[in-house]
């Protein structure tokens, strides 16, 4: 099959406004010209977009078109001709669902050759995916599950995070993207199965992100790095930094600090672990009015008080006007994660570059012990 890619899909003006009201999505696969192809079709009113891949070319290739009527699509692939300064149509494709879950179509190439094909829905339970638990639990789409069904991670070096706590690097050879897994340690009560499902799902999402970001196999770039800060029988904290240049040469870098519970793979609320209020923790909901009030009136001032006792020089330096670390707004919504040194709180960035310094605002756990929520594991 001749494979073409529509760069103009993301750079053009015709379809951008459609993302807000996607109505239905189809996940299909079948053989076209002796190559197994997976296709995702998204409906947007009377318009549609699709992306497809093959097992030997897992990068996304884009189609766009019109919905003729229910479950009938007329689509094209095209590319931008810089010499003519216009889009040029490469292939024309027609899909129709003749019977329930039975699709047929015609793929017409630019040279006039036509190929008839049949498609059927992708069933994730039939993919024999080694990581089906992570696929289903974290709702990875059938299209993306299909792309990673043959992934075979290679495991590398082990890293000690603390006494009895280890992680191991895992690499996808096809994309060279690495992440990590937690190693079981029954003696230290570290049970890794649940958290590793979450980490596997994240790794699979990274792989799919690279195949979506990098087009024509080589144009664009996507890679990532990670660092594990803390691992206990209850929590893990790590950072993931992503570098990507999708459809341009401009590399965008983003770092995400993550803390997860080992028993369910979910992000815990800091208020469920440490509570500074005078009354018992009232099961606040993050983002609620009550939560914001607590963070501004109680949490922020308490953090300033604690940090002033631990780092008086640093906190008093604000009197010189360099960094006002005594501003509640810096701390009320601070990023946080666990480390072996203690709880780290990252103040919200200020306009003063001199404030963007190496991490320093660690609160030792022995200081936080009196504020631990009764019944919480830590």
Image (cartoon, rainbow, N blue to C red):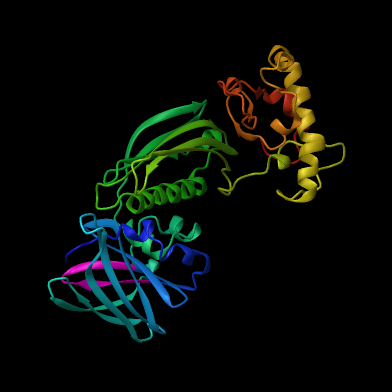
Residue located farthest toward the right when viewing the structure as drawn: 279
Q: Is residue 276 visible?
A: no
Rendered image quadrant of residue 236: top right
Judged by its main secondary structure, the magenta piece is strand
Residue located farthest toward the bottom when viewing the structure as drawn: 99
**Residue at 49 percent of width and 49 percent of height:** 198
Q: Which residues are magenta?
A: 27-39
How many dots with numbers? 0
The percent position of residue 303, horizontal first and vertical second, equals 74, 28
Rendered image quadrant of residue 313: top right
Between 288 and 235, the one lying in front of the other is: 288
**Residue at 13 percent of width and 76 percent of height:** 112
Q: Is residue 150 visible?
A: yes
- In the depicted structure, whether residue 232 falls above or below residue 221: above
The quarter of the image holding the C terminus is top right
Residue 321 placement, left or right of 51: right
The percent position of residue 216, horizontal first and vertical second, equals 24, 53
Between 318 and 87, the one lying in front of the other is: 87
Between 72 and 145, the one lying in front of the other is: 72
The percent position of residue 62, horizontal first and vertical second, equals 31, 63
Between 333 and 90, the one lying in front of the other is: 90
């Amino acid at each position: 099959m001749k494979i073409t890619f529509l760069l103009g899909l993301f750079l053009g003006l015709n379809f951008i406004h459609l993302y807000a009201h996607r109505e239905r999505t189809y996940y299909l696969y079948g053989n076209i010209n002796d190559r197994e192809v997976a296709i995702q079709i998204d409906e947007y009113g009377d318009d549609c977009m699709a992306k497809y891949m093959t097992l030997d070319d897992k990068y996304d290739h884009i189609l766009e078109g019109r919905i003729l009527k229910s479950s009938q699509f007329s689509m094209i692939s095209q590319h931008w001709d810089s010499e003519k300064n216009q889009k040029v149509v490469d292939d024309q494709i027609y899909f129709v669902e003749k019977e329930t879950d039975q699709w047929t179509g015609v793929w017409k190439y630019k040279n006039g050759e036509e190929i008839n094909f049949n498609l059927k829905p992708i069933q994730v339970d039939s993919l024999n995916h080694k990581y089906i638990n992570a696929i289903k639990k974290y709702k990875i789409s059938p299209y993306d599950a299909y792309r990673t069904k043959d992934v075979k991670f290679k495991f590398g070096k082990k890293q000690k995070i603390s006494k009895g706590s280890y992680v191991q690097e895992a690499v996808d050879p096809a994309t060279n993207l690495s992440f990590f897994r937690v190693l079981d340690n029954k003696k230290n009560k570290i049970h890794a199965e649940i958290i590793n499902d979450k980490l596997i799902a994240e790794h699979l999402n990274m792989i799919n992100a690279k195949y979506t970001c990098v087009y024509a196999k080589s144009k664009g770039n996507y890679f990532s790095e990670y660092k594990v800060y803390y691992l206990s029988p209850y929590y893990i904290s790590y950072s993931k930094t992503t570098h990507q240049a999708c459809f341009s040469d401009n590399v965008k870098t983003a770092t995400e600090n993550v803390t997860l519970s080992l028993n369910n793979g979910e992000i815990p609320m800091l208020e469920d672990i440490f509570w500074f209020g005078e009354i018992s923790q009232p099961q606040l909901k993050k983002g609620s009015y009550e939560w914001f009030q607590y963070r501004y009136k109680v949490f922020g001032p308490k953090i300033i008080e604690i940090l002033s006792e631990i780092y008086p020089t640093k906190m008093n330096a604000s009197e010189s006007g360099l960094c006002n670390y005594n501003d509640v707004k810096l701390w009320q919504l601070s990023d946080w994660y666990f480390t072996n040194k203690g709880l780290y709180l990252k103040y919200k960035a200020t306009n003063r570059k001199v404030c963007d310094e190496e991490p320093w605002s660690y609160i030792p756990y022995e200081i936080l012990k009196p504020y631990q929520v009764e019944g919480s594991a830590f």
